[in-house]
Image (cartoon, grey):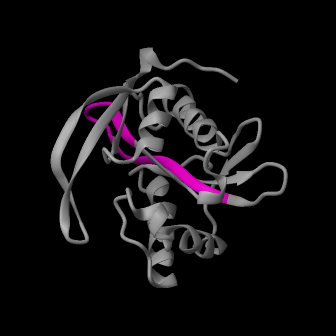
Amino acid sequence: MEKFPILETERLILREFNDEDAKNLFANYSREIVTRYYDLDEMKDINEAVELLKDFQSRYCEKRGIRWAITLKENNEYIGDCGFNGWDFRNYKTWVGYALIPEFWGKGYASEAVHEVLNYGFNETDIIDLHKVSATVQPQNKRSKSLLERLGFTFEGTLRENMFKIDRFLDAMVYSMLKREYKYKK
């Protein structure tokens, strides 16, 4: 397996997760405001973060996907994570996901990180020749819908009651981008 790719933007470094990142994952995913629209429940114990970290670390080695820790270039501070959640080799596609610490919302970091991840997926990876990247968003998650639309994703439709969370079924809006629709910018 090739070396884990480190991605760099104007303000960010997207790096491989390390064992010390369990505390960062717990700090983010133990907050209801972060997990409200996410496919994970709010973490109650650091061991849940350790297990998620192991999953993130194994995805790349097992060619199941890839997840980056997002850090600020200026001080290496962890601000969230993003990546591809499962390669579909037969159909040349994947799903993108992202979660930032709330203090860093609204500053353009998520757009910057996801854009660079898309560039890697469509142009740089030799793992899969991606044709399509999709994302699912709960209808109430206005920030995430707006981010995907700004990046050029197209709304495809709604999967009704697609996910069970806590005590109810939730809809999922599906957005996607084809390789020919991706516009690279530095």
Is residue 66 depicted above or below 44 in this figure?
above
x then y, percent, for residue 161: 15, 52
49 displayed left or right of 169: right
Q: Is residue 74 left or right of residue 57?
A: right
Q: In front here: 84 or 170? A: 170
Q: Where is residue 166 drawn, in percent x and y?
A: 25, 71
Task: Identify which residue is drawn at 32% across, 48% down.
Answer: 138
Q: Is residue 102 above or below residue 149?
A: below
Q: Most prominent secondary structure in the magenta stretch?
A: strand
Look at the image and say whether residue 90 sits in the magenta stretch: yes
Region rendered in magenta: 79-95
Where, by quadrant of the figure, is residue 84 drawn?
Answer: top left
Q: Is residue 51 magenta?
A: no
Q: Residue furthest top?
A: 180
Residue at image position (47%, 83%) is 47
The one of 146 and 131 positioned closer to us in this rendering: 146
* For residue 179, above or below residue 160: above
Residue 122 position within the rendered picture, expressed as x and y whole percent measured from the top left: 49, 27
Of the 4 image quadrants, the one containing the C terminus is top right
At 44% across and 57% down in the image, what residue appears? 59
Q: Position of residue 44 (x, y in %)?
A: 44, 82
